[in-house]
Amino acid sequence: MKTFKSIAYASAGRPQQVGDGFVGQSMIPSNRFEDFSPFLLLDHHGPMQVKPSRTPKGVDEHPHRGIETVTVVFEGALQHRDSAGNNGVIFAGDVQWMSAASGLVHEEKHELNFSRQGGTLDFIQLWVNLPRAHKMEKPRYQELASSQIPVVALNENTQLRVISGALEGINGPALTYSSVLLADVIVSGESWFELQLPQNQNVAIHVVMGEIMLNKTEKLANKHIAKLSQAGEWIEIKTEKEGARFLILGGEAINEPIVSYGPFVMNTQAEIRQTIEDYQSGKMGFLEAIEYES
Ligand code: MN
C-alpha cells in the first residue's frame, strides 16, 4: 500500500536583499535549518524588475568555504566569475552548481546584456552543506545548461526536470558530495500526479510560482516552503488551471556540528578562525577589476 508524506510545517519567506541587485525572500527558517540538512539556505530572488543599467548590479566579490552554492534561474540572466578561474552566464532554465569547498572568492551579477536592457529577474540560490570529509576539496564548478538537464512529462501539462539525485527513474547530471535531490516541476495548467520521494531523508517543497494542493487537502501557497514528514513515501499533487512551479529538495542529513560565520560554514570554531585568516591573507584568491564602458 502506498504511504503518503504530509506537510510537517510550512512557512513564508523573510524579506531580504543581497548586494544591490537581488531582492527577495529567504525561505529556510533560520531556527529550523537542521530540518532541511544538507540545505542551509534557500534565497528566492524575484520576480523583480531590473532597470536598465550600464554597470551590472548584484553582489560584489566575496568568499565562501565549506559549502556549495546552487543557482537556478527561472527568468532573466546572471553572470558569475570566481578566483578559481571560472566564468559563466546562467540563463532561464540553466543551473550553476559551484562547490566552493576549500574556498574561493566570486561575484554574482546581472548578465551584461540583460543589465543593459533590463527586464524580469527570477531565480533561487541554495547553499548546500558539505560533509566534513569534503569541505577542503578543491573548488569545483558545474554549469548545467537547460539542454543538459533531463526532463520528463508526467502528463500533458507537467514537466519534471531532475537536476541532481534521482526521481521517477531519472538521474540528474549534477555531481554532489552527499546524497542531494533537486528537481524542478513545471505545471502549465490543471494537473494531477503522484511522485515517489526518498525515504529517511529530509524532503521539502518550495513553491516558485502559483499554488499547489498536496494530498487533496493541504494547500501550499506561492513562495511558501514546506518541510514534509519523514514518514510516508509518496506525495499527490494537484494544480488548478493557473498552473504552478515548485522545487523538490531532498537529501541525507549531514549529522555533523555546524559553525558558520557569514559565507563560511565549517565544523569547529578553530576552523572558522583559520578560514578567516586564510581569506584575509589572500589564500582564496582575488578577482581582477572590470571596467564597464559607460
Ligand atoms: Mn556567493
Image (cartoon, rainbow, N blue to C red):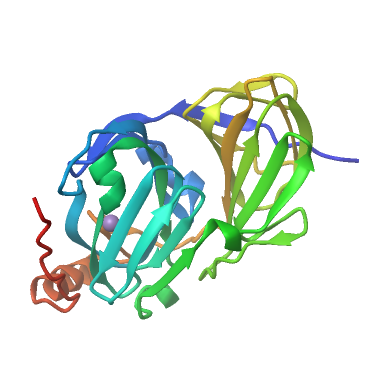
Depth check, front residue: 230 or 130: 130
Quadrant of the image containing the N terminus: top right
Viewed as shown, does residue 78 lie left or right of 271?
Answer: right
Q: Residue at x 65, y 44 (%)?
A: 230
Q: Residue at x 18, y 74 (%)?
A: 274
Q: Quadrant of residue 157?
A: top right
Q: Nearer the viewer, residue 220 or 148?
A: 148
Find residue 102 and report its horizontal and vertical position in percent.
30, 75
| Residue 57 position (above or below residue 65) | above
Q: Is residue 169 left or right of residue 148?
A: right
* Residue 160 position in % (x across, y down): 68, 46
- Residues 87 and 239: in front is 87
Instruction: Say if 142 sits above or below 239 in the image.
Output: below
Return the x and y of residue 126 as percentages of the image width and height.
42, 51
Image quadrant, ligand 1: bottom left
Does residue 131 appear anywhere in the picture? no
Judge left or right: residue 60 versus residue 166. left
Which image quadrant is residue 5 in? top right
